[in-house]
Image: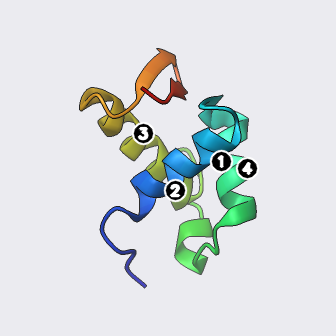
Amino acid sequence: MRRQNGFWPDTIYKALRSFGGQACLTPDVYEWVQNNVTLTERELSASPHQGRPYYVNTVRGIASDMADKGLLIRVNAGCYRLP
């Protein structure tokens, strides 16, 4: 199953809003995603990147890209807030 364009950025925005606009990926955003998104078997499976689930790598990479584009503000390593 392929996610629609914008799915992950929208999901990250929703997760951050649920924490008042600022949160760290570990554990807050990752746990929020796991509890609020129906993840596929592949997204839950261990990736070759330190054995983390694929969805963790996806969220981490997209959040970083969003910060690089000014769509999020990086407040600390792995921690973001809404602009």
State which tag comes first along the sequence, 4 or 3: 4
Residue 36, percent from left and from top: 70, 64
Q: Earlier in the sequence, mark 3 or mark 2?
A: 2
Q: Are marks 4 and 3 in contact (CB under 8 Å)?
A: no
Give residue 61's quadrant in the image. Answer: top left
Q: Which mark is residue 11?
A: 2
- Mark 3 residue type: Ala
Label 3 element class: helix
Q: Position of residue 65 (x, y in %)?
A: 30, 38
- Give the vertical position of 12 relative to 82 (above or below): below
Reading the image, the residue beneath label 3 is: 63
Q: Residue at x 54, y 68 (%)?
A: 43
Question: Looking at the figure, which quarter contains the N terminus?
Answer: bottom left
Q: Which is in the foreground here, disc 4 or disc 2? A: 2
Lower position in the chain sequence, tag 4 or tag 2: 2
Cα distance, mark 1 to mark 4? 4 Å
For mark 2, does the 10 Å Cα neighbourhood hold few (<14), some (14 to 19), or many (20 or more) residues?
A: some
Q: Residue at x 53, y 58 (%)?
A: 55
Q: Are marks 1 and 4 in contact (CB under 8 Å)?
A: yes
Q: Amino acid at mark 1?
A: Tyr
Which-is-in-front pick, marks 1 and 2? 2
SS assignment at label 4: helix
Residue 30: numbered disc = 1
